[in-house]
Amino acid sequence: MMITAVAGQRGWASQKEFDRLLNYYLSERDVVNNKQTALMKWRQYQKDGQWVSDANSATDGDLYIADSLALAAKTWPKRAAYYHRLEKALANDILAYEYNPTTKVLTTGDWVDAKSHYYKLMRTSDVMPTVFNQLAKDTGNQQWVSVKNQMLDRLVDLSNQHKTGLVPDFAWVTADSAKPVGANTIASKYDGDYWFNACRVPYLLATSKDPRAKKVLNKMMKFFAKQYEVFSGYTLKGKPILKRKNAGFSAPIFYAVNHNRNQGYDNLFNSEMSIYAQRLNQNDYYGATLMTLVAVEGWK
């Protein structure tokens, strides 16, 4: 939806195409405690020849959908009221079902509640300051400003813990602290490393004007600028995990340097743009999606 909304601004996609994706989202909204929500079920796939949908939402996906609705309202103003109504409903349910009032941080999905072991878990790719600002503006709910402040503060905590400035996929958080999780906490043995969630952080911070976002971004980007080549994943101390390139890591870095010139890491522009000289990998939806999103957003 986000790619299509951005493409729509450039005249490369139609409102009809966006609405087809919108209807898909509307048909796959999650149910919590027998109540229909505006949150989306996180995955649909084929099983035994039938399409099935996994219950439970993913907070990052819900935030992207909300942001795409905000952008669609600007792109196709005749239907803006409808898009904004859906955006507000989704934003409200994110705060209702994907938020911890003690830590004041978004949880990873609606499957996490106060009784869950993961209630104080934060996914660094859920830290989206520009999206939080947009939701605060469109909904009039200043709680989104509080979410932005709290989650950026926790991201700064994580950035300060290593000279590299790298942040992990997941962290344990309190109201005033954060620490990386250990291996195999929730998704993989790389949960506490700069891996396939944290790789989105440069993209998510790239256009934020908040000084904390800029501080975190500049520190990690200067680490990447000193590397002979940017590889797929790093320990927080800066040791490469997989010594090969992946669009999921390169595209966010390319986007970040493109929007933040003369900050000490301009050399990354050409090195990370090299992924666009390759064919789109049809077997890597994650890398292909990030690569396409950055491409349609364009570069200077």
Image: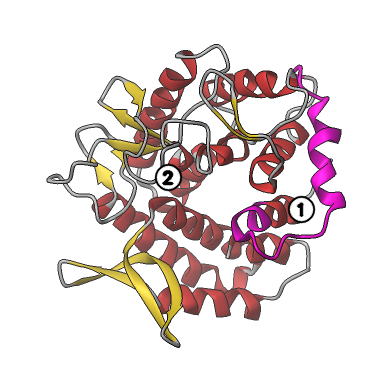
Spot occupied by residue 290 in the image (x, y as percentages of width and height): 65, 52
Q: Evaluate whether residue 265 shows in this view.
A: yes
Spot occupied by residue 47 in the image (x, y as percentages of width and height): 41, 80
Q: Which residue is mark 2?
A: 136
Residue 189 found in image quarter = top left
Residue lying at the far top in this picture: please name it: 163
Position above or below: 83 against 245: below
Residue density around tag 2, few if under 14, some if 14–19, many if 20 or more, within 10 Å: many
Q: Which residue is mark 1?
A: 295
Q: How many marks?
A: 2
Q: Residue at x 83, y 34 (%)?
A: 271
Residue lying at the far bottom in this picture: please name it: 49
Dot 1 amino acid type: Ala
Q: Is 6 or 244 nearer to us in this picture? A: 244
Mark seen at residue 176: none
Residue 88 among magenta residues: no
Q: Evaluate whether residue 299 shows in this view.
A: no
Q: Residue at x 68, y 55 (%)?
A: 293
Position above or below: 17 against 138: below
Q: Which residues are magenta?
A: 263-290
